[in-house]
Image (cartoon, helix red, strand yellow):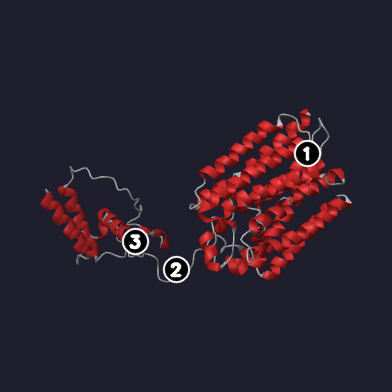
Amino acid sequence: MAFLRAAAAADLVRHHRRVPHASLILHPALLPPPPPPSMESFPDGPSTPGPVARNDIFAATLCHRHRHRRWPRPLIPISSSSYDGSGARLPATVSLYLHLSSTSSGAGGDSTPPHQSPPAPPPPSPWVDRWVPLAARPYAMLARIDKPIGTWLLAWPSFWSIAMAAMPGELPDMRMLALFACGSVLIRGAGCTINDLLDRDIDRKVERTKSRPLASGILTPTQGVGFLGFQLLLGLPILLQLNNLSQILGVFSLLLVFSYPLMKRFTYWPQAYLGLVFNWGALIGWAAMKGTIDPAIILPLYTAGICWTLVYDTIYAHQDKEDDVKVGVKSTALRFGDSTKPWISGFGAACIANLALSGYNADLAWPYYPFLAAASAHLAWQVSTVDLSDRLDCNRKFVSNKWFGALIFGGILCGRLVS
């Protein structure tokens, strides 16, 4: 029996070269397969037995010899159609052999076609693909509408200060929260547009950012500048609804937003500068509610936000540390190196301490502190479990910071309602 199996395999390999290319068997969508020729067309069999006919004879013989043998089910799905370009049906055994041989050759060597085009940019997230018109999708991706985590991180500090500024026993001003939510979407989009305009040459050299609309050439710099002006124009009515002090602080924040992308060229601490930018809303939110700044409450809150940014954006920067070295830009991930976890542990402790001080000075009631303890545990979980050599894990921990912000906001809300 073993001898018969060996002979059958050798005969199969010998006749394999006469069978049409496997791609025609495995991809029948290239040509709609015609129906198989009926047996009436060849009452006495083919006059000249070609390769397909011989393989049919071989397959019939093989099935006859092993009709009682139970063959294992193939692990690789086989095309349901087994016709070659001339309409002749190929034996299922030959189709299986060609499929397995083409798969194994692709796994062992370079199976990429010599003239294959470069991979296309990753598609936008499903909801953007579903709701945003095709012409507007590059602009949505430029503003990072498909990645809302940045908007959350920008909005939370302003939500904190608005909730702290509420009167004891009352909810925060919902109209003000809505204004700052819309402003966070627009300012975050404008900041991403500025960043991509200034960094488009660098982004082309970084694996994670080379598919961005400006870096990949989907949008031109002129289109990017026009879109930036459009976003700032939409944000102007929001700013004009605030008081004078808030408007001054809002205009000054644009200087920080415009200059942030340049920091990575000059200092290893661009994450600290980002903390100044992303937590500026804590100052504007309190000023919009009170018309002034209370340093005892707002400065600890602003400092806590900066320390928090140093934690999550250092983790985020570890995704690009190899590419950053190649292109010559700086980050705290490169500055801290193997000592990253002790550094961000210290910043996390400073963040929690300043949040506790700010809440105490704002006379928040006791429910604030259990929420603060839960947020502290979440921050400790991030720092202790993050794998700084794994890009996916760094991104997961970074995205989870939206829950840290939500815990602090919930604590401030409950603490103000009870006080």
SS at circle 3:
helix
Mark sitting earlier along the chain (2/3): 3
**Label drawn at residue 116:** 2
N-terminal of the pair, mark 2 or mark 1, is: 2
The structure residue drawn at horizontal position 66% and vertical position 35%, both measured from the top left corner, is 372
Where's residue 283, x and y in %?
79, 48
Location of residue 18 (image quadrant):
bottom left
Q: Are marks 2 and 1 in contact (CB under 8 Å)?
A: no
Task: Say which mark, if any, is on residue 266.
Answer: none
Cα separation, mark 2 vs mark 3, equals: 15 Å
Distance in Å between CA atoms under marks 1 and 3: 61 Å
Q: Nearer the viewer, residue 145 or 362?
A: 362
Tell me the quarter of the image containing the C terminus.
top right
Measure the alpha-carbon separation of dots 2 and 1. Answer: 58 Å
Q: Residues within 10 Å of mark 2 (few under 14, many from 20)?
A: few
Q: Amino acid at mark 1?
A: Met
Q: Which mark is residue 106?
A: 3
For label 3, the crowd category at 10 Å Cα-Cα, with few meaning under 14, some 14 to 19 and many 20 or more, is few
Residue identifier under label 1: 164
Query: Residue 351 appears at what percent x and percent y?
Result: 66, 44
Q: Earlier in the sequence, mark 1 or mark 3?
A: 3
Secondary structure state at the residue bearing disc 2? loop
Seen in the picture, residue 72 relative to 52 is either above or below; the reply is above
Point out residue 296 in the picture as x, y percentages from the top left corner: 79, 42
Which of the 4 quarters of the picture holds residue 218?
bottom right
